[in-house]
Image (cartoon, grey):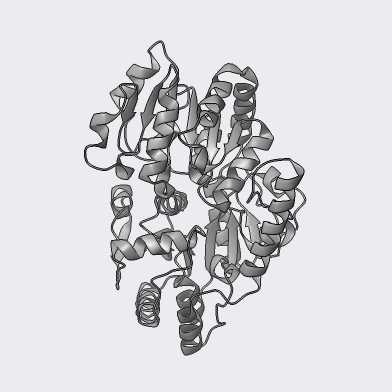
Amino acid sequence: MRTLIFAPVTFNLAETTRMIAIARALGPSWRAIFQVYEDPYTHLIEQAGFEIRRLSPVLTPAEQAQALALDQGRSIRHPFSARLVRERVAAERRLIRTSGAEAVVMGTNPTSLLSARAEGVPLFYAVPFALTRPHVEQTSHLGLVLGEDPLRRLLDRAGSAALRLVYDRLPIAPRAFTTVAREVGVEPLRTGAALFEGDHTLLTVMPSELDGYTLPPSYHRVGPIFAELPCEVPEVVERLAAGPRPLIYLALGSSGDRRTVLGAIRSLARLDVEVIAPVRHLLNPGDEDSLPDSIHPVDLLPAHRLGGLVDAAVIHGGQGTVQTACATGVPFVGMGMQPEQSWNVLVCAREGNAIALHRRDAGTARLSDAVSRLLGDPAYRRAAERVQDEYAAEDGCAAAVRVIEQVLAGSAPGGAEVRQD
């Protein structure tokens, strides 16, 4: 039996579920091993029935928050000391050798960039297009500053040029990755872009998102990949959906924070709606006691089953959450928490099924007004239904497996999309 190692960052829900989705699409000749360090979402891998190998050293919760902020472009602080990188690379190399893995499929586990290459196995990186090397290099307006007035456009262009310089040219990668790369005999990782590029990069996007771009040969469009959590829709959702008031879905993922959640709740409480909100992980003990009666906090929901139950959504712009809304035909307001998420929302705003706002709009009339527009203007619903039909023709997981198998067979298509059968 052939073996693949999957290397998600298991304190990132979207990455963990994306890796699970690809692993599920493997044929019976494949064995999937998940290498994991931290626990927050490892239980989802266990529930999916995949083999798990726990490696060390493990990041503390504070270090996990640092790593997540670095990944999302919100901070330059990081937990990646030379000791930690060296020990993780050694542990991952041992797993590759002892398992006989033919390749590694990673989320954003940066030590895999060193361990896979040191062991001479291909590294596949499943990732959104936003903030990849070709996206940053070929986009003059990255959406860092929202708005269409001349001043905002000028500021966005200047900000995009500055990000391009920092991300793609300056040696901003943690020094440990260069140090350990030299020790194991692989190309040093110096730039931000080098930390987010596999030997083969699998772009989990729709065809329209690549219009006007030229992809390098190692980049392959595979299509949307998003979570399908193995749980039932809670009774409260079905009860609220059957009620007289519109039902709004509020989700801010791993990127949200208590302040933004409470602000969004204040805005939505002004409307004649019910709100189902899987945001308990972002609230403090006692917060729920003071929430308005129209706000219903819950734990994780199977968002892919909410089509036809919710009337609109307010989300953070993470690709998985955005793609779930698109695939289920739900129009949404997106508040990007970092540049990649803002771009994901802008893509949908151009399609007409979303409204793009700032994170700081949570708690203001701009958010409540935007939700009212979604509910009152049927054009948003029509656009959402059109996008839903387009998504129905995609199978990103199967396409990702085809690329992996083609690369390993020496016949991969380069710089193009994988045919959807």
Residue 383 against residue 240 in the figure, above or below: below
Residue name at image x 36 percent, y 56 percent: 11
Q: Is residue 391 toward the left or the right of residue 212 in the image?
A: left
Residue 414 seen in the current view: no
In front here: 255 or 413? 255
Q: Position of residue 117 (x, y in %)?
A: 51, 77
Q: For this rendering, which residue is in front, 286 or 130?
A: 286
Q: Quadrant of residue 285?
A: top left
Q: Looking at the image, is 110 positioned above or below residue 202? A: below
Q: Is residue 402 left or right of residue 295?
A: right
What residue is rendered at 30% in x and 66% in y?
53
Residue 135, compared with residue 184, is above or below; it is: above
Residue 244 on image: x %, y %: 41, 10
Quadrant in which the C terminus is drawn:
top right
Q: Measured from the top left, where is residue 74 in percent x and y?
A: 49, 58
In the image, 301 versus 404, the foreground residue is 301
Q: Total number of numbered labels?
A: 0
**Relative to 229, does residue 400 appear above or below in the rendering?**
below
Residue 387 % position (x, y) = 62, 32
Please name whichever residue, 8 or 174, is drawn nearer the observer in this view of the structure: 174
Q: Quadrant of the N terminus?
A: bottom left
| Whether residue 298 can be seen here | yes
Q: Residue at x 30, y 54 (%)?
A: 40
